[in-house]
Image (spheres, grey):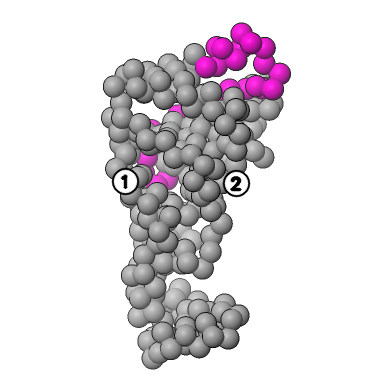
Amino acid sequence: MRVLTIYAHHNPQSFCHAVLERFTEGLRDAGHENEVVDLHAIHFDPVLHDRDGPGWVDDSVPDDVLAHWRFGTSLLARERNPLRKVLVKRWIGKSDDRELVRRVHALGPPRDVAEQQAKVARADALAFIAPVYFVGFPAILKGWVERVFSLGFAFGMTADAWRGDLVARVPLLRHQKALIMQTTIWDEASYDAGLKAAMKLLVDEYALRFPGIQRVEHEYFHAVHGADDARRAAYLDRAYQLGREF
C-alpha cells in the first residue's frame, strides 16, 4: 500500500518525531511504501491567500448564488496596489461573472498546493502525526487541510450544497484509510469526558470522512509530558504496531 504521512511538529527531538520514526519502521517492515511530508521542514504556508482562490470556486456555483457574490467587483476591490488594480481591471475586461469564475478556476492551485495534491492523489492511504493543539490539529496542519483539500480535489458542490446543505457536498477522495496519531497534554479521562467526541466530529468526520476517505482511525498518546519511561516505550511500541498492521 502507498501511504502518505503528513507530519507536523516543529521540534525534531519531540516525542511526536519518535512516533513518526517507529510508525515508519512498522510500515517498512510490513512492506508498505511510505512518503513523509514534514510540514515544518518544507516551510509549508498554512494561510489561505488570494492565490488560493481558484481552488474555492468553480462552474458548479448556481446563478442565484453567483449573483450575490458580485465576483468581478470583488476581484477588483481586494487589490490595494494601484498598479495591480489596473492590471486586474484589464484582465477582467468585459467578462461577466460566470466567465470570470471559469477563468479564475482555470488558473489552478498555487504550486505548493498542487505538489501536495499530487502526493495525496498518488497515495492509497493517509497518516497524520501531530500534537493536539486546542482540541484539534496544529495550525500548520489545519492549514494544510484547508489549502490542499480544496473544491474540485477533495469534494465537489451541488446546487443544494452551495445553498447550505452539508450532505449535498460530493466526496471526491478515494483513499482506503486515514490514521491520525496525536500526542496530548491531558490524560485519557479528560478526552473521554468530551474532548475526543469533539475531535471525532471536527477532524475525523468533517475533515476526512466527508471528503470520501473510507475508514478513519484516531490514536491518542495521552499525557506524554507526565508519562514515565515505561509508558513512553509502550506508546512507541504501539506506533510501530500501527505501522506494522496498517
- Please say whether residue 234 is one of the residues in the magenta stretch: yes
Label 1 sits on a secondary structure element that is helix
Compared to 52, does 230 lie above or below? above
Q: Quadrant of the N terminus?
A: top left
Q: Residue at x 29, y 22 (%)?
A: 31
Compared to 5, does 226 lie above or below? above
Label 1 sits on residue: 121
Q: Which residues are magenta?
A: 210-236
Amino acid type indicated by mark 1:
Ala
Compared to 112, does 18 lie above or below? above
Q: Kindly tell me whether residue 242 is visible in this rendering.
A: no
Label 2 sits on residue: 139
Q: Residue at x 50, y 36 (%)?
A: 7
Q: Residues within 10 Å of mark 1 (few under 14, many from 20)?
A: some
Q: Position of residue 152 (x, y in %)?
A: 35, 58
Pointer 1 and pointer 2: residues touching (CB < 8 Å)?
A: no
